[in-house]
Structures are given as structure tokens and as C-alpha cells.
Amino acid sequence: DTGVSQDPRHKITKRGQNVTFRCDPISEHNRLYWYRQTLGQGPEFLTYFQNEAQLEKSRLLSDRFSAERPKGSFSTLEIQRTEQGDSAMYLCASSNEQGLTEAFFGQGTRLTVV
Amino acid sequence: ILNVEQSPQSLHVQEGDSTNFTCSFPSSNFYALHWYRWETAKSPEALFVMTLNGDEKKKGRISATLNTKEGYSYLYIKGSQPEDSATYLCAFRGYGQNFVFGPGTRLSVLP
């Protein structure tokens, strides 16, 4: 296992189009997080899963955003009808809820909406 | 809404200088404080997980201290090197809560 991987690394899309990102966490990790980072800001929490259950969603996650983790392994984040304000780095992280483990991050998907 | 702040926002130092930054977080419901280093085009890398008031952790030239009663943590880098150039993020965790990240401190070490 080489860590958390995200695909694609970069995505350029036209406003109004739908996009989907994928995250493959570290295999034994049961928690998976999605964050968004815009220029000059730290990562902002979007949502997290414990196994296949989506346990928390941020108010930042409008109804155009949906995330799934159907088998408790990989996760997808879909943005419908993209807007220019959606341009950001989307980071995925995973952790094992056994004690005080840190979250391990993927390299992120950079979305540019033109 | 939990507020995690970091200062300064950015910092430029000369190679060999020592430097430090601050992370401020809520002093109630504390569970853990994490420090990450995020280099350009790479994933954020975990540096420290700190849990106890008065904790001090060290990894090479980098060390961190924790004061949970007043809600701050310091990260120190001794003898900065160009490869230390990165954004340093802190993340606060309260009991039963997820990571809340600060905005980061961007460090540039000039050769």
C-alpha cells in the first residue's frame, strides 16, 4: 500500500459541467475525509465516512456536492453544475480510528472551473 | 464554529536561522493537536501528534510544544535549511470531533 491516492490530479472543466473525483484510502483505514483548500487558506472540512456511512457533512457542502463510499473502500466526490467558486484543491485523507492516529493525505485533485 | 489560527501567515528566513510559529486553538474540549508539513505538489505530511498539556515533541531540527490550558502550540525549526520550505499546518481535534485545520504558515528558507 503506497498511501492515499487521488484521481485525477488536475481537472479543468467548463462552468456548468459535472465532475467526479476518486479517492483510494490506505486499505486498513476505516475513516475517510474530504477537504477543500482554496488559495491562502488551510484545508476546510467537507465530509467524512466511517466505513460506508457518511457521518458528517459540512455546511460548505451544498446540494451540488455529493460524496459516496459504497463499499467502505474508495470514495467519490461529485460536483454538479460546477461554478467558478468551486475552483480549489480537493484533498482526501484517511485514518484508522484506533487511538490517536494522524490522518494521511492524498496529493489532491486541483479543480479549475473556467 | 471552531477557530484555529496560525501566525505568521508567511515567513522568509535565511538558511541557518532558527524560527518559530504559533497555532492558537480552543482551550476547551481538547483532544489532540496535530502538526503537518505541506510541500508544494506533495501530500501534507504528519509531523507531530500532541495530547498532553506541557508536551514537547522533537524530530530532528523541528520541535513543538503544547499548552492546552491557554490554547496554543509552538513549532520551532532550528538552523533552517532550504528543504524546510513548506506550509506548516496545525489541526485541532476536540473530543468526538474531526480535524479543524488552521490556515497554515508558509515558510521560505533562502539559501
Image (cartoon, coloured by chain):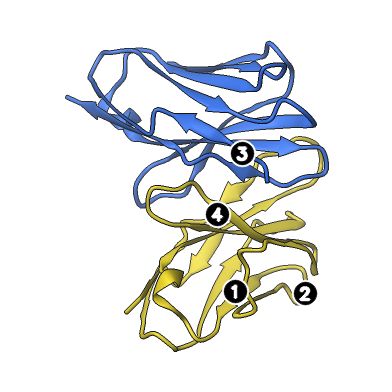
Q: Farthest residue in the left direction?
A: B111
Task: Give the mark nearest the N terminus, 2 or 4.
Answer: 4
Rendering coords of residue A33 (x, y %):
66, 58
Q: Chain of mark 3?
A: B
Type of amino acid at the residue the image marks with label 4: Thr
Residue under label 4, please give it: A2
Q: Is residue B100 above or below residue A112?
A: above
Rendering coords of residue B24 (x, y %):
58, 27
Task: Report how far apart the C-alphas of labels 1 and 3 lie in the structure.
Answer: 26 Å
Colour displayed for chain A in the image of the structure: yellow
Q: Secondary structure at mark 1?
A: strand
Task: Give the mark nearest the N terminus, 1 or 4.
Answer: 4
Q: Chain of mark 1?
A: A
User: Going 17% across and 24% down the picture, which residue do you hit?
Assistant: B111
Q: Farthest residue in the front direction?
A: B1
User: Going 74% across and 18% down the picture, which residue do you hit?
Assistant: B52
Type of amino acid at the residue the image marks with label 2: Lys
